[in-house]
Image: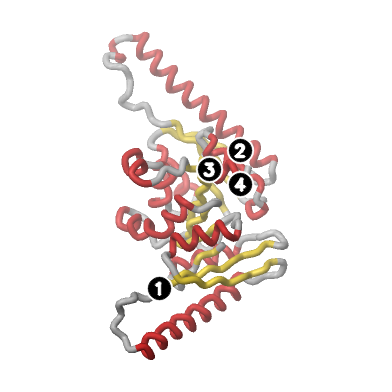
Protein backbone atom coordinates (compact mmCIF):
# COMPACT_ATOMS: atom_id res chain seq x y z
CA UNK A 1 0.00 0.00 0.00
CA UNK A 2 1.39 3.39 -1.06
CA UNK A 3 -0.14 6.47 0.56
CA UNK A 4 -0.14 9.60 -1.59
CA UNK A 5 -1.53 13.07 -0.98
CA UNK A 6 0.02 14.78 -4.00
CA UNK A 7 2.85 16.36 -1.98
CA UNK A 8 6.55 16.21 -2.95
CA UNK A 9 7.13 13.82 -0.02
CA UNK A 10 4.41 11.50 -1.30
CA UNK A 11 5.85 11.74 -4.82
CA UNK A 12 9.14 10.33 -3.50
CA UNK A 13 7.27 7.46 -1.87
CA UNK A 14 5.50 6.66 -5.15
CA UNK A 15 8.75 6.84 -7.12
CA UNK A 16 10.47 4.53 -4.64
CA UNK A 17 7.61 2.02 -4.78
CA UNK A 18 7.70 2.12 -8.59
CA UNK A 19 11.46 1.45 -8.66
CA UNK A 20 11.42 -1.70 -6.50
CA UNK A 21 11.65 -5.10 -8.24
CA UNK A 22 8.30 -6.49 -7.10
CA UNK A 23 7.72 -10.18 -7.83
CA UNK A 24 5.09 -11.20 -10.37
CA UNK A 25 1.55 -11.05 -9.02
CA UNK A 26 2.22 -8.17 -6.65
CA UNK A 27 -0.79 -5.97 -5.95
CA UNK A 28 0.02 -2.33 -5.22
CA UNK A 29 -2.77 -0.26 -3.73
CA UNK A 30 -2.40 3.49 -4.23
CA UNK A 31 -4.27 5.25 -1.45
CA UNK A 32 -5.39 8.87 -1.21
CA UNK A 33 -6.97 10.13 2.03
CA UNK A 34 -8.57 13.57 2.03
CA UNK A 35 -9.61 15.31 5.21
CA UNK A 36 -13.39 15.86 5.19
CA UNK A 37 -14.58 19.39 4.59
CA UNK A 38 -15.40 21.30 7.74
CA UNK A 39 -19.11 21.05 8.46
CA UNK A 40 -19.22 24.65 9.62
CA UNK A 41 -18.12 26.14 6.29
CA UNK A 42 -20.42 29.06 5.60
CA UNK A 43 -21.01 28.27 1.95
CA UNK A 44 -24.21 28.10 -0.10
CA UNK A 45 -25.19 24.49 -0.89
CA UNK A 46 -24.26 24.87 -4.57
CA UNK A 47 -20.80 26.24 -3.70
CA UNK A 48 -20.25 23.45 -1.15
CA UNK A 49 -21.16 20.77 -3.70
CA UNK A 50 -18.93 22.41 -6.31
CA UNK A 51 -16.02 22.40 -3.89
CA UNK A 52 -16.55 18.72 -3.13
CA UNK A 53 -16.72 17.95 -6.85
CA UNK A 54 -13.44 19.80 -7.42
CA UNK A 55 -11.75 17.80 -4.65
CA UNK A 56 -13.01 14.53 -6.16
CA UNK A 57 -11.77 15.58 -9.59
CA UNK A 58 -8.32 16.48 -8.23
CA UNK A 59 -8.17 13.21 -6.29
CA UNK A 60 -9.11 11.14 -9.35
CA UNK A 61 -6.50 12.90 -11.49
CA UNK A 62 -3.78 12.46 -8.91
CA UNK A 63 -4.55 8.76 -8.39
CA UNK A 64 -4.60 8.18 -12.14
CA UNK A 65 -1.13 9.76 -12.36
CA UNK A 66 0.14 7.63 -9.47
CA UNK A 67 -1.36 4.49 -10.99
CA UNK A 68 0.50 5.16 -14.22
CA UNK A 69 3.77 5.62 -12.36
CA UNK A 70 3.35 2.36 -10.44
CA UNK A 71 2.21 0.27 -13.40
CA UNK A 72 4.58 -2.37 -14.78
CA UNK A 73 4.31 -5.87 -16.27
CA UNK A 74 3.39 -8.47 -13.66
CA UNK A 75 1.87 -5.96 -11.24
CA UNK A 76 -1.71 -5.09 -10.49
CA UNK A 77 -2.34 -1.51 -9.38
CA UNK A 78 -5.51 -0.53 -7.58
CA UNK A 79 -6.54 2.95 -6.47
CA UNK A 80 -8.52 3.81 -3.35
CA UNK A 81 -9.80 7.24 -2.32
CA UNK A 82 -11.37 7.82 1.08
CA UNK A 83 -12.25 10.72 3.31
CA UNK A 84 -11.07 10.76 6.90
CA UNK A 85 -8.18 11.27 9.28
CA UNK A 86 -5.10 10.24 7.21
CA UNK A 87 -3.12 8.15 9.74
CA UNK A 88 -6.20 6.33 11.03
CA UNK A 89 -7.47 5.66 7.51
CA UNK A 90 -4.12 4.31 6.30
CA UNK A 91 -3.87 1.92 9.25
CA UNK A 92 -7.49 0.77 8.93
CA UNK A 93 -7.21 0.16 5.19
CA UNK A 94 -3.89 -1.67 5.61
CA UNK A 95 -5.59 -3.96 8.12
CA UNK A 96 -8.59 -4.52 5.82
CA UNK A 97 -6.36 -5.28 2.81
CA UNK A 98 -3.97 -7.49 4.83
CA UNK A 99 -1.14 -5.36 3.43
CA UNK A 100 2.40 -6.72 3.61
CA UNK A 101 3.97 -3.25 3.51
CA UNK A 102 2.90 0.38 3.79
CA UNK A 103 4.99 3.07 2.09
CA UNK A 104 4.56 6.68 3.17
CA UNK A 105 6.49 9.88 2.52
CA UNK A 106 8.50 11.90 5.00
CA UNK A 107 8.50 15.67 5.00
CA UNK A 108 12.05 15.85 6.32
CA UNK A 109 14.21 15.19 9.36
CA UNK A 110 15.64 17.00 12.34
CA UNK A 111 13.98 18.50 15.45
CA UNK A 112 11.37 20.54 13.57
CA UNK A 113 10.89 17.96 10.88
CA UNK A 114 10.07 15.32 13.49
CA UNK A 115 6.95 17.30 14.35
CA UNK A 116 6.02 17.42 10.65
CA UNK A 117 6.70 13.71 10.26
CA UNK A 118 4.93 12.83 13.44
CA UNK A 119 1.24 13.23 12.77
CA UNK A 120 0.97 10.79 9.87
CA UNK A 121 4.13 8.78 9.14
CA UNK A 122 5.15 8.20 12.75
CA UNK A 123 1.61 7.29 13.78
CA UNK A 124 1.37 4.82 10.91
CA UNK A 125 4.70 3.31 12.02
CA UNK A 126 3.30 2.88 15.54
CA UNK A 127 0.01 1.27 14.59
CA UNK A 128 0.19 -0.34 11.13
CA UNK A 129 -0.36 -4.12 11.02
CA UNK A 130 2.70 -4.56 8.79
CA UNK A 131 6.19 -3.11 8.25
CA UNK A 132 6.27 0.56 7.25
CA UNK A 133 8.75 2.15 4.84
CA UNK A 134 9.15 5.91 5.32
CA UNK A 135 10.55 7.17 2.01
CA UNK A 136 13.11 9.96 1.73
CA UNK A 137 14.55 9.02 -1.65
CA UNK A 138 13.24 7.67 -4.96
CA UNK A 139 15.08 4.34 -5.06
CA UNK A 140 16.91 1.76 -2.96
CA UNK A 141 20.21 0.14 -3.92
CA UNK A 142 22.26 0.01 -0.70
CA UNK A 143 20.88 -1.32 2.57
CA UNK A 144 21.96 -0.87 6.16
CA UNK A 145 20.50 -3.44 8.54
CA UNK A 146 20.76 -2.62 12.25
CA UNK A 147 20.90 -5.68 14.51
CA UNK A 148 21.30 -5.82 18.28
CA UNK A 149 20.54 -9.50 18.62
CA UNK A 150 17.02 -8.92 19.94
CA UNK A 151 13.77 -10.45 18.72
CA UNK A 152 12.92 -7.02 17.32
CA UNK A 153 16.01 -7.14 15.10
CA UNK A 154 15.39 -10.72 14.03
CA UNK A 155 12.10 -9.65 12.47
CA UNK A 156 13.83 -6.97 10.42
CA UNK A 157 16.49 -9.46 9.31
CA UNK A 158 13.77 -11.94 8.29
CA UNK A 159 12.14 -9.32 6.05
CA UNK A 160 15.42 -8.51 4.28
CA UNK A 161 16.31 -12.18 3.86
CA UNK A 162 12.96 -13.35 2.52
CA UNK A 163 11.45 -10.47 0.54
CA UNK A 164 12.39 -10.68 -3.17
CA UNK A 165 12.73 -6.89 -3.46
CA UNK A 166 15.98 -7.05 -1.48
CA UNK A 167 17.65 -9.86 -3.40
CA UNK A 168 21.14 -8.97 -4.59
CA UNK A 169 21.24 -5.58 -2.88
CA UNK A 170 24.54 -4.54 -1.31
CA UNK A 171 24.01 -4.68 2.45
CA UNK A 172 25.90 -3.55 5.52
CA UNK A 173 24.96 -5.13 8.86
CA UNK A 174 25.74 -2.93 11.84
CA UNK A 175 25.56 -4.01 15.46
CA UNK A 176 26.11 -1.22 17.99
CA UNK A 177 27.41 -1.95 21.47
CA UNK A 178 26.15 0.75 23.84
CA UNK A 179 29.10 2.82 25.03
CA UNK A 180 30.33 2.24 28.58
CA UNK A 181 32.45 5.39 28.59
CA UNK A 182 32.24 7.09 31.92
CA UNK A 183 30.62 4.03 33.49
CA UNK A 184 33.72 2.50 34.96
CA UNK A 185 33.48 1.88 38.71
CA UNK A 186 34.59 4.79 40.83
CA UNK A 187 38.32 4.58 41.50
CA UNK A 188 38.84 1.87 38.90
CA UNK A 189 41.85 3.69 37.50
CA UNK A 190 43.52 3.38 40.92
CA UNK A 191 42.63 -0.28 41.35
CA UNK A 192 44.12 -2.55 38.67
CA UNK A 193 41.69 -5.40 39.34
CA UNK A 194 38.64 -3.18 38.85
CA UNK A 195 40.16 -1.56 35.77
CA UNK A 196 40.91 -4.98 34.30
CA UNK A 197 37.37 -6.20 34.98
CA UNK A 198 35.90 -3.14 33.28
CA UNK A 199 38.13 -3.62 30.23
CA UNK A 200 37.09 -7.27 30.05
CA UNK A 201 33.44 -6.22 30.15
CA UNK A 202 33.98 -3.86 27.21
CA UNK A 203 35.81 -6.59 25.28
CA UNK A 204 33.03 -9.08 25.99
CA UNK A 205 30.44 -6.58 24.79
CA UNK A 206 32.35 -6.00 21.56
CA UNK A 207 32.76 -9.74 21.04
CA UNK A 208 29.04 -10.34 21.53
CA UNK A 209 28.10 -7.69 18.96
CA UNK A 210 30.75 -9.02 16.56
CA UNK A 211 29.05 -12.42 16.74
CA UNK A 212 25.65 -10.81 16.15
CA UNK A 213 26.83 -8.82 13.13
CA UNK A 214 28.80 -11.71 11.60
CA UNK A 215 25.93 -14.13 12.10
CA UNK A 216 23.35 -11.85 10.50
CA UNK A 217 25.65 -10.94 7.59
CA UNK A 218 26.26 -14.64 6.97
CA UNK A 219 22.55 -15.51 7.01
CA UNK A 220 21.70 -12.66 4.66
CA UNK A 221 24.51 -13.60 2.26
CA UNK A 222 23.30 -17.20 2.24
CA UNK A 223 19.80 -15.89 1.41
CA UNK A 224 21.05 -13.98 -1.64
CA UNK A 225 21.56 -10.58 -0.01
CA UNK A 226 25.34 -9.99 -0.04
CA UNK A 227 26.22 -8.48 3.31
CA UNK A 228 29.27 -7.47 5.32
CA UNK A 229 29.39 -6.98 9.07
CA UNK A 230 30.52 -4.07 11.20
CA UNK A 231 30.44 -3.34 14.92
CA UNK A 232 30.35 0.10 16.46
CA UNK A 233 30.21 1.47 19.98
CA UNK A 234 28.37 4.49 21.28
CA UNK A 235 24.86 5.93 21.20
CA UNK A 236 22.92 3.35 19.19
CA UNK A 237 20.79 5.69 17.06
CA UNK A 238 23.70 8.05 16.38
CA UNK A 239 25.96 5.20 15.32
CA UNK A 240 23.33 3.73 12.99
CA UNK A 241 22.86 7.13 11.34
CA UNK A 242 26.62 7.70 11.08
CA UNK A 243 27.06 4.28 9.48
CA UNK A 244 24.32 5.09 6.96
CA UNK A 245 26.04 8.36 6.08
CA UNK A 246 29.44 6.69 5.69
CA UNK A 247 28.10 3.93 3.44
CA UNK A 248 25.76 6.23 1.50
CA UNK A 249 22.89 3.88 2.36
CA UNK A 250 19.54 4.37 0.64
CA UNK A 251 17.57 2.47 3.28
CA UNK A 252 17.99 1.64 6.96
CA UNK A 253 16.12 -1.47 8.13
CA UNK A 254 15.58 -2.01 11.84
CA UNK A 255 13.20 -3.47 14.37
CA UNK A 256 11.30 -1.62 17.04
CA UNK A 257 9.66 -2.45 20.35
CA UNK A 258 6.68 -0.44 19.18
CA UNK A 259 6.54 1.77 22.26
CA UNK A 260 3.90 4.46 21.96
CA UNK A 261 2.42 7.37 23.85
CA UNK A 262 3.82 8.57 27.15
CA UNK A 263 6.10 5.52 27.49
CA UNK A 264 7.87 6.53 24.28
CA UNK A 265 8.30 10.10 25.51
CA UNK A 266 9.74 8.92 28.82
CA UNK A 267 11.94 6.09 27.56
CA UNK A 268 12.87 7.23 24.09
CA UNK A 269 13.26 4.89 21.16
CA UNK A 270 16.21 4.02 18.94
CA UNK A 271 13.84 3.36 16.05
CA UNK A 272 12.10 6.70 16.47
CA UNK A 273 15.38 8.63 16.70
CA UNK A 274 16.63 6.92 13.55
CA UNK A 275 13.31 7.55 11.82
CA UNK A 276 13.44 11.26 12.62
CA UNK A 277 17.09 11.93 11.82
CA UNK A 278 18.21 9.39 9.22
CA UNK A 279 19.61 10.77 5.94
CA UNK A 280 17.75 8.13 3.93
CA UNK A 281 14.58 6.05 3.83
CA UNK A 282 13.79 3.89 6.87
CA UNK A 283 11.95 0.56 7.07
CA UNK A 284 10.56 -0.17 10.53
CA UNK A 285 9.50 -3.69 11.52
CA UNK A 286 7.73 -3.65 14.88
CA UNK A 287 8.14 -6.67 17.14
CA UNK A 288 4.41 -7.42 17.14
CA UNK A 289 4.38 -7.38 13.34
CA UNK A 290 7.55 -9.45 13.03
CA UNK A 291 6.01 -12.21 15.13
CA UNK A 292 3.15 -12.52 12.63
CA UNK A 293 5.22 -12.48 9.43
CA UNK A 294 8.15 -14.66 10.57
Q: Residue 159 bears which disc, if any?
A: 4
Mark 1, residue position:
36
Q: Residues within 10 Å of mark 1 (few under 14, many from 20)?
A: few
Q: Residues within 10 Å of mark 2 (few under 14, many from 20)?
A: many
| Colour pattern | secondary structure
Mark 2, residue position:
217
Q: Nearer the viewer, mark 1 or mark 2?
A: 1
Q: Nearer the viewer, mark 2 or mark 3?
A: 3
Q: Is residue 203 above or below residue 52?
A: above
Secondary structure beneath label 1: loop
Q: Nearer the viewer, residue 187 or 88?
A: 88
Q: Residue at x 27, y 14 (%)?
A: 187
Q: Nearer the viewer, mark 2 or mark 4?
A: 4
Decide which of tag 2 and tag 4 comes sooner along the chain. 4
Mark 3, residue position:
288
* Separation of marks 2 and 3 at Cα, in angstroms: 24 Å
* Mark 2–mark 3 CB contact (< 8 Å): no
Query: Residue 293 at x, y = what percent?
Result: 62, 46
Q: Nearer the viewer, mark 4 or mark 1?
A: 1
Decide which of tag 1 and tag 2 comes sooner along the chain. 1
Q: Nearer the viewer, mark 1 or mark 3?
A: 1
Q: Nearer the viewer, mark 4 or mark 3?
A: 3
Q: Residues within 10 Å of mark 4 (few under 14, many from 20)?
A: many
Q: Quadrant of residue 108?
A: bottom left
Secondary structure beneath label 3: helix
Amino acid sequence: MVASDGSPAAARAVALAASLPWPGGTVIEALRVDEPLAVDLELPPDAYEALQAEIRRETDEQLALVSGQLAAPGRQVRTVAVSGRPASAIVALAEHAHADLVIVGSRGRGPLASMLLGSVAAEVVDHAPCPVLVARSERVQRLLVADDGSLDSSGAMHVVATWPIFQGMTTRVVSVAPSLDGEAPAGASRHPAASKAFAETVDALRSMHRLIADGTAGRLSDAGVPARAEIRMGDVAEQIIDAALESDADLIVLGSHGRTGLERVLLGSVARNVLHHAPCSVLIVRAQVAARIA
